[in-house]
Image (cartoon, rainbow, N blue to C red):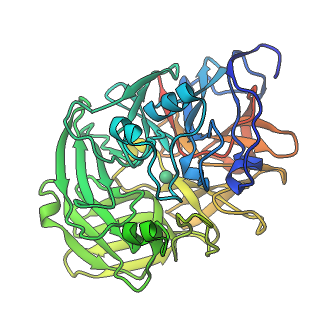
Amino acid sequence: MTPGTTSVFSLPPVEWPDNEFLKGLFEPVRAELEAGDLPVEGRIPEALSGVYMRNGFNQQYPPLGNYHLFDGDGMLHAVYLDGGRASYRNRWILTEGLLEERRRERALYYGLAELRFPDPDLVRSTGPFKNAANTHIVRHAGRYLALWEGGMPTEVTRDLATVGLSDLGSDYLGPFTAHPKVDPDTGEMLAFGYQPFPPHVRYLVVDASGVLTTVKDVGIERPVMMHDFAVTSEHVLVFDAPAIFDIPGALAGTAPVLDWKPDEICRVGIFPRSGGPSSIRWFEIEPSFVFHHMNAWTDGDVVTVDCSRFPDLPLRFHPEDSLLEVDPAEMHRYTFDLGTGTVGLEKLAEGPSDFCRVDDRRAGKRTRYGYWGTMLDPDRSFAVFDAIVKYDDSTGSVTRFRLKPTEWTGEPVFAPDPSGAAEDDGWILSYVSDMAEGTTHLHVLDARDIAAGPVARVALPGRVPFGAHGSWLPD
Ligand SMILES: [Fe+2]
């Protein structure tokens, strides 16, 4: 532990089972740390005033059965920036399930790869699965919401204390995506929830004051997995891909919980936000799976969505194996012409691409720039990146910043320069871990010139494992 660091909570080392998601980059950390005035190489832009929070998977107890990465207990890692100085803290999100496990000092819930239920009293109190709150952290209507797509958001504070499960002021207690979209003009947060039993997919709207006001059945009649969706200022797009849950098959032990069925239809539904899903129109597409959409917009009759497109589902939930060997995702653009009913598809850039982001203030509107992670080293694996990409749609070109060979990173998050007017006036934030050193830095790249390398490297007091999504939350 570096000098000036306080450990506010720690657990003794634990013997993890042999599982690819519990070692190396993925190995959970065992302590909650705080440190002020972090060492900085370069200069943190003084205009950056706020907090970068990132959520991720950090299992606390040795798991029951086969562990899948997505099962891990949510942990937030936050770097607070103010006047060119930085401080850090990390905290487990104290979900109802994790608190129950702490009371009994062991894992109590099975993961996604195993279709098994915990003790009946737990099923009654918290449901059959732990809402691990481990996938994303967003701020809406002044509330910090840690998201997990199987259940409702968990509210936390800016200091990362857990408030508890949120009902968003409604009586809806169903699934809620980890990728809601906030409309920069109306302040509404649009979302959806999917589940393996009817109604399979519901469209949700949380108003600008934070109250969930709309719950509507999208009308998908099969149990699909849907991690993300896309929203424009006028339309909502849902990708109904053949990533299908087979609960009876899994209970009988004859099928994975979730599997890819490329012979079944793959289609995209588009409905106007003003009319809702009762006026959905379907467009059939070639089999493909999208974890993450970058942005979408409507221009006349044409709806465009840029997304990270897999030709196949890259994972499944199965007791023996969870990660399939498939071609990586690449950035693509779909266009749907509502007048002619035609679909266009083009590749935006070559090479593995995922965890794509834009300036969130331009969500739902045409954007020129996008940012994502890529893997230039062909020996690296799924969703671990060795370079950050900036895409310029005006030329169709990309620029990259490549890390050192021992470094890896995750999602790049755009933090706007409050005094800037151009779309790329801002910085790119991401955690970069050095596998040789066992250290993690916050990298601050100038979005106007990412190839120049970080303008600041902020040394964190402890390692940050591979994680999921985060947000820049300005003061
Ligand atoms: Fe995601």
Q: Viewed as shown, does residue 150 lie left or right of 64?
A: left
Image side of residue 156 versus residue 282, left or right: right
Q: Position of residue 475 (x, y in %)?
A: 47, 21
Indicate left or right for 36 with 165 as reference.
right
Locate residue 62, reporting x and y percent. Answer: 66, 42
**Which of 255/178 is in front?**
255
In the figure, residue 426 lies in which quadrant? top right
Report if residue 425 is visible in the image: no
Which quarter of the figure is the N terminus placed in?
top right
The residue at the point 75 percent across, 63 percent down is: 380
| 365 in relation to 50, above or below | below
x, y percent for residue 97? 47, 35
Among all residues in the image, which is located at the extreme right?
436
**Residue shown at 24% from the left, 70% from the top:** 221
Residue 50 position (above or below residue 106)? above
* Tally of numbered discs: 0
Q: Nearer the viewer, residue 52 or 265?
A: 265
Q: Is 413 placed above or below 294 here? A: above
Left or right: residue 453 versus residue 436 is left
* Furthest-bottom residue in this view: 263
Q: Is residue 82 visible?
A: yes
Residue drawn at 48 percent across, 49 percent down = 358
Q: Position of residue 203 (x, y in %)?
A: 23, 53
